Amino acid sequence: MLEIKLLREEKERVIEGLKKRHLPEEQLAYVDEVIALDDSRKKIQTESDVLKSQINQLSKEVGDLFKQGKRDEANPLKEKVAELKSKNEVMDSEMNTVKNRIEEILLSLPNVPHSSVKSGKGEEENEVYQAWDNELPDLGESAMPHWELAEKYNLIDFKLGAFITGSGFPLFRGKGAKLERALINFFLEEASEAGYEEIIPPLLVNEDTARGTGQIPDKEGQMYYCEKDDLYLIPTAEVPITNIYRGQLVTENDFPIKLTGYTPCFRREAGSYGSDVKGLNRVHQFDKVEIVQIQHPDKSYDTLMTMLSHVEGLLNKLGLPYRILKLCGGDTGSAAALTYDFEVYSAAQKRWLEVSSVSNFETFQTNRMKLRYKDENGKTQLAHTLNGSALALARIVAALLENNQTEAGIKIPETLQAYTKFSIID
């Protein structure tokens, strides 16, 4: 959530930044509306403070007069106090209306993109930040896509998953399940070695938690909702892990706060159809290891680069061809100021598959969560939050199966063999 102070002090930068997201004019006008509403809030607050001071003073006088037995003098003042209290109730109602409208608008506005983010309407306008310079694998026309390999080697049963639950809920079995578990353990160990504390969070969260990281009110349609319990299934471990520090006041010495966690992730992905979402390309439930950092604002963009290097290291160890995209304004998530996507090359499908997003949210999430720190001068400031997929497994598994297929079977990358306990799927 954007700070009102930012809208006031850097109004032009905010508007120019939001234009990169191609927001409609009526939404850009919210900036001026919030400033005007905040002016009204301040005016009402000032008048209310004066009124309450008068009420307190008169109430004291009324009490003193009653103690002195001067009831005739006290009663008119008592009526005046009642009149002022009634007026104050009206002002409180006006104040609540203004505050609610301000919050409604601020919750609807996305983050301001970083100055380096280019304007753009969608993914077709993203820029390639780092290309794959080596030759892409060519397995020939006989190469099988991962869904055929999964069936051939009895690794993933998409039909049985659909029978048990529905389309988009794959069932892993045998060496497919072991490969999935091996990847989870590998990613967690790599994160632990990089200094991240491992977390096993709840898989369901309440509305306050979902709002804290920006899923509500922006992404309700993508989340599974348990109506009777008023809880949401998590779309990513980012949500519960980042909220560990909701409402907390940390110190500069606490930075960087580094957390990691494996969870299943649940996303409705409504309206996704066609061959491009076949198999593991897009599913409603998938496994993912997430890395989260809470950092000092002066260091968050250096941290973002460190997190990019971490994800890059994982893909290098797995031997997967990858490229890094820098997202344009229109494709950047509403909570993020800057996002880089990693894509791996699927040799059988001959297409790039997104496997990670690494983002800096600056103060957007911490303002919602009231996550603050005291600076060296003792002043309370908002921290910055960052997160990244390290990594999302579904498409990683798809690429590993396709890119490592041979006539003898599917070879397991050497770095994973200590976790799988086998070197080939045959």
Image (cartoon, grey):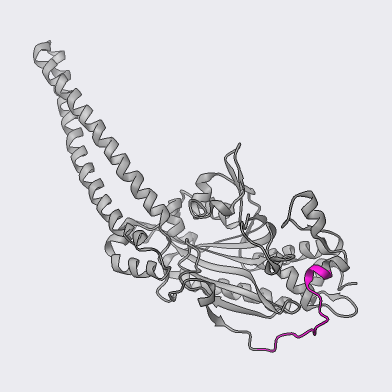
Relative placement, left or right, of 20 versus 74 is right
Q: Residue furthest toward the front?
A: 274
Residue at 63 percent of width and 85 percent of height: 132
Q: Is residue 147 magenta?
A: yes
Expressed as whole percent of the image width and height from the top left, the position of residue 61 reads 13, 22
Q: Does residue 223 appear anywhere in the picture? A: yes
Q: Is residue 135 above or below residue 284?
A: below
Residue placed most toward the observer, 272 or 98: 272
Expressed as whole percent of the image width and height from the top left, the position of residue 350 reads 71, 79
Which is the main secondary structure of the residues drawn in magenta?
loop
Q: Is residue 224 above or below residue 194?
A: above
Relative placement, left or right, of 254 versus 94 is right
Magenta stretch? 134-149
Residue placed most toward the observer, 11 or 307: 11
Residue at 87 percent of width and 73 percent of height: 424
Q: Is residue 293 above or below residue 221?
A: below
Relative placement, left or right, of 367 versus 140 is left
